[in-house]
Image: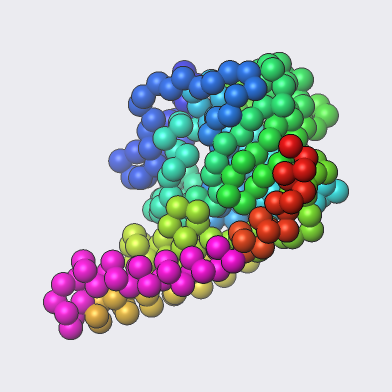
């Protein structure tokens, strides 16, 4: 029922996104459950913020991504519920709704700071704690005036705001930790692992900043690919050389991720322990 809108928008013979057949039970009350953020380069770059609730992922599209600065309120458009299976999805949507590249940018658990999540959503004020790789501490989603709430998603505007705590700060987290928490790659890595040729003629975005981003990413993905096929030509085993160059790429980006994670954790850890 709740996933009707999600399914209506997509053609699962064309898109690798999960249709979400199974039914899921989610914890209730102040119990930790799954959350994720997917960085999605489509007609525009945005971050999809998803909280598990009642067997689905409640979803908000955040154009600028989450901010760790409590004075920076980030617009979050409430969109259609997604299946729980979507929470680990990363890949290329070749065409249709959301065509582009999806990166699993953060994942972990969220815990409501209220007993009744449904009541908080109806009221338009949901406070919660995140425990992800990149996002931690206390946050709030506040609905802007005039907008309503409908389960399933009504494309209404909310604000995503970090509360002042030990995990708040002025680090630009999107810039500081830009890579996938699943594969440790960037958009070009994800595209090159798929098929960089699909958008040679018809791209998800052509002009402007997004068009330029796609152009660069496609060029880099094709370069990575051609590097791989050169190697496979020599060794004669294309699969083996693909995974070896993938490992190299992952290893080099892994260093970047763990450094940035290390810095944040190191800087905040002491205070976080004190607060508990
Ligand atoms: Mn999206």
Question: Which residue appears at 55% of the width and 68% of the height?
Answer: 256
Asked whether, in this view, residue 248 is left or right of residue 261, the answer is left
Outermost residue on the left side: it is: 236
Observer able to see residue 141: no
Identify the magenta region. Answer: 232-259
Indicate the position of residue 162 as horizontal and vertical percent values.
77, 43
Question: Which residue appears at 32% of the width and 79% of the height?
Answer: 227
251 falls in the magenta region: yes
- Considering depth in this image, is 127 or 47 the residue closer to the camera? 127
- Considering depth in this image, is 10 or 28 the residue closer to the camera? 28
Asked whether, in this view, residue 73 is left or right of residue 250, the answer is right
Total marks shown come to 0
Indicate the position of residue 240 as horizontal and vertical percent values.
21, 69
> On the rendered image, what quadrant is the C terminus found in?
top right
Asked whether, in this view, residue 119 is left or right of residue 170, the answer is left
113 falls in the magenta region: no
Where is 61 relative to 31, above or below? Answer: below
- Considering depth in this image, is 266 or 210 the residue closer to the camera? 266
Where is 37 relative to 124, above or below? Answer: below
Q: Main secondary structure of the magenta part?
A: helix
Picture quadrant of residue 224: bottom left
Indicate the position of residue 26 as horizontal and vertical percent values.
51, 22
Question: Which residue appears at 46% of the width and 63% of the height?
Answer: 185
Indicate the position of residue 119 as horizontal and vertical percent values.
71, 16
């Amino acid at each position: 029922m709740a996933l009707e809108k999600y399914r209506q928008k997509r053609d699962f013979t064309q898109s690798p996104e999960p249709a979400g057949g199974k039914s899921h039970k989610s914890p209730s009350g102040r119990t930790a459950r799954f959350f994720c953020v997917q960085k999605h380069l489509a007609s525009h770059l945005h971050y999809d913020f998803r909280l598990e609730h009642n067997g689905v992922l409640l979803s908000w599209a955040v154009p600028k991504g989450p901010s760790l600065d409590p004075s920076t309120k980030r617009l979050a458009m409430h969109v259609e519920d997604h299946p729980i299976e979507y929470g680990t999805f990363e890949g290329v949507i070749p065409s249709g709704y959301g065509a582009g590249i999806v990166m699993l940018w953060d994942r972990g658990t969220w815990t409501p700071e209220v007993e009744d999540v449904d009541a908080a959503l109806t009221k338009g004020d949901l406070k919660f704690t995140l425990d992800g790789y990149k996002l931690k501490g206390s946050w709030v989603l506040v609905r802007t005036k005039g907008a309503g709430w409908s389960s399933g998603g009504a494309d209404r505007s909310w604000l995503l705001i970090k509360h002042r705590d030990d995990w708040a700060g002025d680090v630009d987290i999107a810039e500081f930790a830009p890579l996938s928490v699943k594969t440790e790659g960037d958009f070009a890595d994800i595209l090159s692992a798929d098929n960089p040729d699909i958008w040679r003629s018809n791209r998800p975005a052509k002009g402007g900043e997004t068009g330029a981003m796609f152009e660069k990413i496609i060029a880099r993905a094709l370069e990575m690919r051609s590097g791989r096929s050169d190697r496979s030509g020599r060794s004669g085993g294309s699969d083996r050389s693909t995974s070896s160059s993938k490992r190299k790429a992952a290893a080099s980006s892994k260093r970047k991720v763990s450094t940035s994670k290390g810095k944040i954790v190191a800087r905040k850890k002491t205070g976080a322990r004190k607060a508990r």
